[in-house]
Amino acid sequence: MRGLQLFTVLSYDRDSDRVVKSEEYLNGQLRTTRTPQPEQQDSAGRTLLPVTVVPFWGLASTQTFVLGEPLGRPEMVFYENGRTVRVTDWFSGTAVPRVSETRDRHGNLIERSLIKPGSLADLDLVTRYKVGRSGIPALVGEDALIIDLETGDQLASLDGVRITAFIRLFVVIDDTDSRATRMEN
């Protein structure tokens, strides 16, 4: 898109492949910073990697990933206000969620989102429901999305009024010799 420049700067731990920070920029302004935290073990013995996400605007969150999971899908997202989002069903072989649930700080289910691929003229349709204390869902709205099924990245969103496009340009910084490599997606 003309006038839109989105790129990501990855910083590595010396000569390793371990990312210590990821910064997303939009038109030269920092929009999101992701910082991996120390690894943890859960009760099932799995190794988890929490990643702190600090947006330019909005709530900070921590995404938890299971190390060794080949698709790199987040296990859960914890927001600073106590809300959590967990994907309960994934599209097979992808990092694209089919069903996700949002819970409040008390653990009560408050929203469920479903993605229906190809339901709206070759676009994916996301249907959002608010869930009351009785467990009865009420339709909140529907958005159309264009999602890259290989990476799970959202490429565009159509909510009936506007179209939002997402274009990614990755910049890799090697701290050892100050080289920058650009990778476009």
Image (spheres, rainbow, N blue to C red):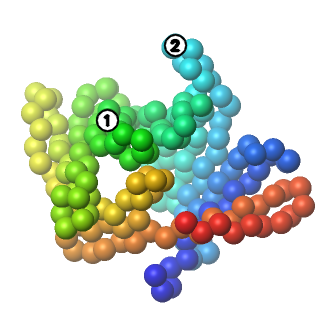
Q: Pointers 2 and 1 in contact (CB under 8 A)?
A: no
Numbered circle sitting on residue 89: 1
Instruction: Determine the residue positioned at 46% across, 82% down.
Output: 1
**Total numbered labels placed on residues in the image:** 2
Question: Can residue 65 be seen from the camera position used here?
Answer: yes
Work out how far the residue at label 2 is from the one at label 1, CA to CA, in angstroms.
22 Å
Quadrant of res 95: top left
Extreme-right residue of the structure? 177
Q: Where does residue 160 sit, x and y in percent of width and height?
A: 19, 70
Q: Earlier in the sequence, mark 2 or mark 1?
A: 2
Q: Secondary structure at mark 1?
A: strand
Q: Residue at the location (23% across, 40% down)?
A: 112
Q: Of residues 165 and 55, which is closer to you in this image? A: 165
Mark 1 packing: few (<14 Cα in 10 Å), some, or many (20+)?
A: few
Q: Amino acid at mark 1?
A: Asp
Toward which corner of the image does residue 111 lie, by quadrant?
Answer: top left
Q: Is residue 58 visible?
A: no
Q: Which mark is residue 59?
A: none
Left or right of residue 140, residue 65 in this image: right
- Measured as percent of width and height from the top left, residue 35 is found at 64, 45
Could you say which disc has been placed on residue 43 in the image? 2
Q: Which x, y percent locates residue 85?
A: 37, 37
Residue sitting nearer the eye, 24 or 67: 67
Amino acid type for the residue under numbered disc 2: Ser
Which type of secondary structure does the marked residue at label 2 adopt? loop
Name which residue lies at 65% across and 66% down: 183
- To which quarter of the image does residue 180 belong? bottom right
The spot of residue 98 in percent (x, y) is: 30, 43
